[in-house]
Image (cartoon, grey):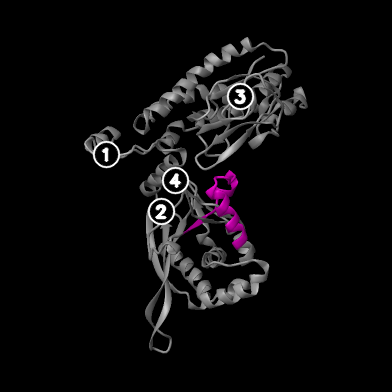
Amino acid sequence: MATEILMPALSPTMEEGTLAKWLVKEGDAVKSGQILAEIETDKATMEFEAVDEGVVGRLLVAEGTAGVKVNTPIAVLLDDGEDASAAAEPKASAAASSSASSAVAASGGSSAAPAPAPAPAVAPASGSARVFASPLARRIAREKGLHLTAVKGSGPHGRIVRADVEGAQPGVAKPAAAPVAEAPKAVAPAPAAAPAAAMPTGMAAETVLKMYADRAYEEVPLDGMRRTIAARLTEAKQTIPHFYLRREVRLDALMAFREQLNRQLEGRGVKLSVNDFIIKACAMALQAVPNANAVWAGDRMLRLKPSDVAVAVAVDGGLFTPVLRDAEKKSLSALSAEMKDLAARAKTKKLAPHEYQGGSFAISNLGMMGIENFDAVINPPHGSILAVGAGIKKPVVMADGTIGVATVMSMTLSVDHRVIDGALGAEFLKAVIEALENPMVMLA
């Protein structure tokens, strides 16, 4: 029996992807675990593995096709000895989904919102109460009388595959699993998800095109990353009540301490940056002021125990915010090495989703580009983000009352007022600055 291979959800937030490259062709025999294709999400290019074995009957989506919705059929897999004609029926059903996706991709941002509307009607059939399973696993489960909600998946992201259902006992899943499965169907607020996924357009595309009809220009289509950035930042500015706290920090003690450490670490090939110290200072401040280590979760707050610090990294066409997990426990040299690795892989879009999702707080440093100060937009669901400017020599009043010169850096903390109040944000920013102006404490 022919089974459909569906566009996978390669991250918890993925709704659509680009089929960048097929690594198999029609007629190829594939095994479980074999790489079938490379799929571009909004943030990375990832390999997609087969969860079943068989022969590729048809490739339903061409290489380079963008905007393919999760759970859309992208290929048909045949059982051994099955004729390619068995793939005809799945192809017909997939064609409708594929053409709908193509229509969305071709129509541009202004008309993208109405097209996904039919998707919820299809979702219940393929999702079976949000249980992710391969088509072959579903067929075997039906034949054995298994209820999939009681089967633990061993495939990617917990997907149930053939081996899981073949080894399961038929009597296991009947008890009251069906009523539990129905609850999400009644509760799931599909309309609420639509605005978040919709592409914010602002002024209509046709209006803008008319304004510049007599001017020479190059039209740049939006890729997945730029669409996601536009949607998330529009959502952030429209829904998060930002306020801003500004402080200056004197860097002279830190610069001298950094120079001394780098001389001592030279033999190990370690060179610490100012940004490494900022990451460590923020990680320590999140521990010193634990109420600021929080995220907004819709109808509640989550206060994190570890200091998971996200750091913005500019890449071609957008940015990543890789997360340094448990940063409070790591040495400066360990943070430096990890940050260099994450930044390098971010620039080539080789980060896995768990490496750029999460965290409660972020750092955006434009000081290295000469920017003196700026206000950063909070990356939801984070409670705050620190904008770091350049260190500049300025005349200052010294401790003894005389006028001297010091290297001063501007820092602006953007805060979500739903999560962090003014006094709490000021306390957190004070803790960051105290660590930076007394860098020896970062070695304790």
Q: Nearer the viewer, residue 141 or 269?
A: 269
Residue at mark 2 = 377
Residue 386: x percent and y percent?
A: 45, 61
Q: Earlier in the sequence, mark 3 or mark 2?
A: 3
The local secondary structure at tag 4 comes to loop
Horizontally, residue 181 falls left or right of residue 80, namely left
Q: Earlier in the sequence, mark 4 or mark 2?
A: 4
Residue at mark 1 = 216
Residue 109: x percent and y percent?
A: 37, 33
Mark-to-mark CA distance, 4 and 2: 18 Å
Residue at mark 3 = 5
Check if residue 2 falls in the magenta segment. no
Circle on res. 317: 4
Task: Say which amino acid is labelled 2.
Answer: Val
Residue 223: x percent and y percent?
A: 44, 38
Residue 286: x percent and y percent?
A: 54, 63
